[in-house]
Structures are given as structure tokens and as C-alpha cells.
Image: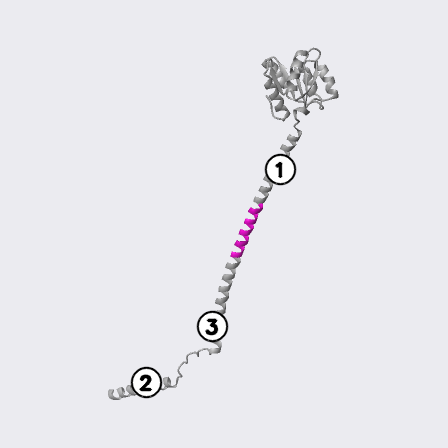
Amino acid sequence: MSSKKTLLLIASGVLAVLLLRRSVMGCRKPRKQPPEPPEYLVAPRKIDETARAEAERQATEDAARIEAEQLKAEEETRREADRQAEIEARRKEETQHQILDATASESESKTKAPEQTVIMVTDDSKVVRVKTGRLLSAHNYQVVMAEDGLDAVRQIETSIPDLLITDLDMPGMGGMELVRHLRGHARTAGIPIIMITADNESLRKEAQESGVNVVLGKPYPEEQLIAQIQLLMTGQSAG
């Protein structure tokens, strides 16, 4: 076979292949794009998304409102607690004032006037008894006399004075022994006692340790004695 014929055969074969391929390609159907979903399916989806967004917004608003209401309730509770605490503090303060006023009134009611106050003067010296008695009477006090400690004890067994003025050195029962006797019995332990003694520091200390309220040295100013009596009868501390 000549070369010319060979080339013609090859060309014919190539042409046949091309024509066959074109024929095959022409027979294939084009791939269709997926159809758009119908409107009746799209609309509900959009509605659901809108409803979800609205629900989330409403939930956020509700949460914020509830939190605000809780904060408001807590603030009102705190204010009410503060108000109650203030009322309670004011009530306690008023109660304390009432107690103090009642105590003051009771103290005033218990404080006797000089005309109601009985003072016993215990001294073995008649001159001293008379002089002291006149001084006390001049200030409207009621006065009873005792010649020594034993006489004072006998009289006090019958009637307890409101206050006792006693000398230190006396025969029979001295002032210190009289004080210890009175302080040793519950019935007479509360009698205010003024002791008249020499200005001796050791005697003063012993007298105070025995229960004497006031120690006055000889001689003493009369106004000092009256002032000490007034202090003792009003329940104040005397020195």
C-alpha cells in the first residue's frame, strides 16, 4: 500500500472518531439546576426566624425587667431594715431616758426633806451633843442623842435613824466598834455614818475601812458638816 493511501485511511479514521464523539455529546442531556423552593415553603421559614428573633428580644427584655424588679425589691428591703433599725434605736433611747427619768424621780421621792430626816448624834460629851444638836436643828433636821456606842445600839434597835454622827473615843463602846457593829447587821448596814476624830491619817484609813462614809477632823467647819449630810442624804458620794 502506498503512503498516500495510508494517510487517507488515517485521516478517515480520525474524522470518524470526531463525528462519533460529536454524536455522543449531542445525545447527552444537560444537567438541570435544582429548582427554587416554592414560596409557600420559604415564607414560613422567614416567619420562624422573625419569631425567634422577637422571642429572643422579648426574653432579654423580660430578664432585664425581672433583674430591675429584684434590685428594686432588695433596695426597698434594705431601706425598710434601716428604718426598723432606726425605730428600734430610737425606742431603746426613749426607754433608757424613761428609765433614767424614773430612777431620778424615784431617787427624788426617796430623798427626805430635812424635817423628815432623823440624825443621831453619839458623843460622850454633853457639850458636843448640845452644840451639834443645835446646829442640826437650825437646819430643820430632827435630832436624837446617844451618850456612847452602847446607848446608840440600844436606841437603834428600836428606831433606825437616817444618819449617824459619832465620836471616835467614847467609854464602853467607842465609835469604831459601834460602826463595825452596825455594818455587821443587815438591818443597820446601810446607815450613812459620819465620824468625828482627830486629824490622824491612820485613824481615817481605819475608819473608812470599817465602813465610815465621811471622816471629819476636829475641829471642823459647821458648814462642812451640813454639806456632807446633804450629800449623804441625796445618795451622792461624800469624801
| Predominant SS of the magenta segment | helix
Query: Mark 2 = which residue?
Result: 18
Q: Are marks 3 and 1 in contact (CB under 8 Å)?
A: no
Asked if residue 6 lies left or right of residue 203, the reply is left
Mark sitting on residue 46: 3
- Amino acid type of the residue that numbered disc 2 sits on in the rendered structure: Leu
Element marked by disc 1? helix
Magenta segment: does it hold 80? yes
User: Residue 103: percent from the left, percent from the top?
Assistant: 63, 33
- Counting every numbered tag in the picture gives 3
Q: Residue at left 48%, top 69%?
A: 50
Badge 3 or badge 2: first in the primary sequence: 2
- Where 142 sits versus 105, above or below? above
- Closer to the eye: label 3 or 1: 1
In the rendered view, how is the structure colored?
one colour
Quadrant of the drawing holding the C terminus = top right
- Where 71 sits versus 180, above or below? below
Distance, label 2 to label 1, CA atoms, is 125 Å
Query: Mark 1 = which residue?
Result: 98
* Mark 2 burial class by Cα count in 10 Å: few <14, some 14-19, many 20+: few
- Where 184 sits versus 25, above or below? above
User: Residue 191: percent from the left, percent from the top?
Assistant: 68, 22
Q: Which residues are magenta?
A: 68-84
Residue at the front extreme?
138
Q: Nearer the viewer, residue 147 or 175?
A: 147
Does residue 233 appear in this view?
yes
User: Residue 147: percent from the left, percent from the top?
Assistant: 70, 13
